[in-house]
Image (cartoon, rainbow, N blue to C red):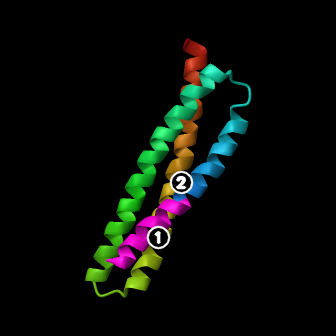
């Protein structure tokens, strides 16, 4: 059980760090938007990113448990699950940032 919790928190921490870095890149990309337009894009990014972090952390927890049941050691299971779901989470967070910029652009053009 301890290795599953370690996998959950390790994946969560990696995804939080990646989200912060992506957020700063997104702020630079949205430099020309007004504050009211950019707020919608940042809000969409934060909501989607929180959902991604939750899903990836739970996925890492579950994959670690599955691998332990298949006779992998707890350390090996954690070392497999954390990178798999961290890389997937970072990729999806990048997509979330593009969606956030798209939302800000949509608000800018239509309102």
Tell me which corner region of the image, top left, top right, bottom left or bottom right, holds residue 75: bottom left
Give the x, y percent position of residue 66: 29, 75
Residue at image point 50% right, 50% down:
92
Residue at image point 31% right, 67% down:
62
Give the x, y percent position of residue 6: 43, 73
Left/right placement of residue 63 relative to residue 75 reads left
Indicate whether 53 appears above or below 78. Answer: above
Secondary structure mostly seen in the magenta stretch = helix
Find out whether residue 3 is within the magenta segment. Answer: yes
Instruction: Check residue 14 in the rendering and tell me which mark sits there, or answer none.
Output: none
Between residue 102 and residue 74, name the one nearer to us: 74
Give the x, y percent position of residue 46: 51, 40
Left/right placement of residue 46 relative to residue 74 reads right
The residue identified by callout 2 is 91
Left/right placement of residue 13 relative to residue 7 reads right
Please state the extent of the stretch shown in magenta in the rendering: 1-14
Element type at mark 2? helix
Find out whether residue 15 is within the magenta segment. Answer: no
Instruction: Check residue 82 in the rendering and tell me which mark sits there, or answer none.
Output: 1
Tell me which corner region of the image, top left, top right, bottom left or bottom right, holds residue 78: bottom left
Residue at image point 36% right, 62% down:
59
Of the 4 image quadrants, the one containing the N terminus is bottom left
Indicate whether 98 appears above or below 18. Answer: above
Indicate whether 65 appears above or below 56. Answer: below
């Amino acid at each position: 059980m301890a290795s599953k919790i370690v996998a959950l928190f390790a994946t969560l921490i990696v995804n939080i760090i990646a989200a912060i870095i992506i957020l700063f890149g997104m702020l630079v990309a949205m430099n020309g938007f007004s504050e009211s337009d950019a707020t919608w894009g940042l809000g969409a990014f934060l909501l989607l990113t929180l959902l991604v972090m939750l899903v990836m952390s739970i996925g890492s927890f579950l994959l670690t448990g599955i691998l332990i049941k298949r006779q992998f050691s707890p350390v090996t299971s954690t070392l497999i699950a954390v990178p798999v779901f961290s890389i997937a989470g970072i990729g999806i967070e990048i997509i979330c940032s593009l969606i956030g910029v798209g939302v800000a652009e949509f608000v800018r053009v239509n309102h």
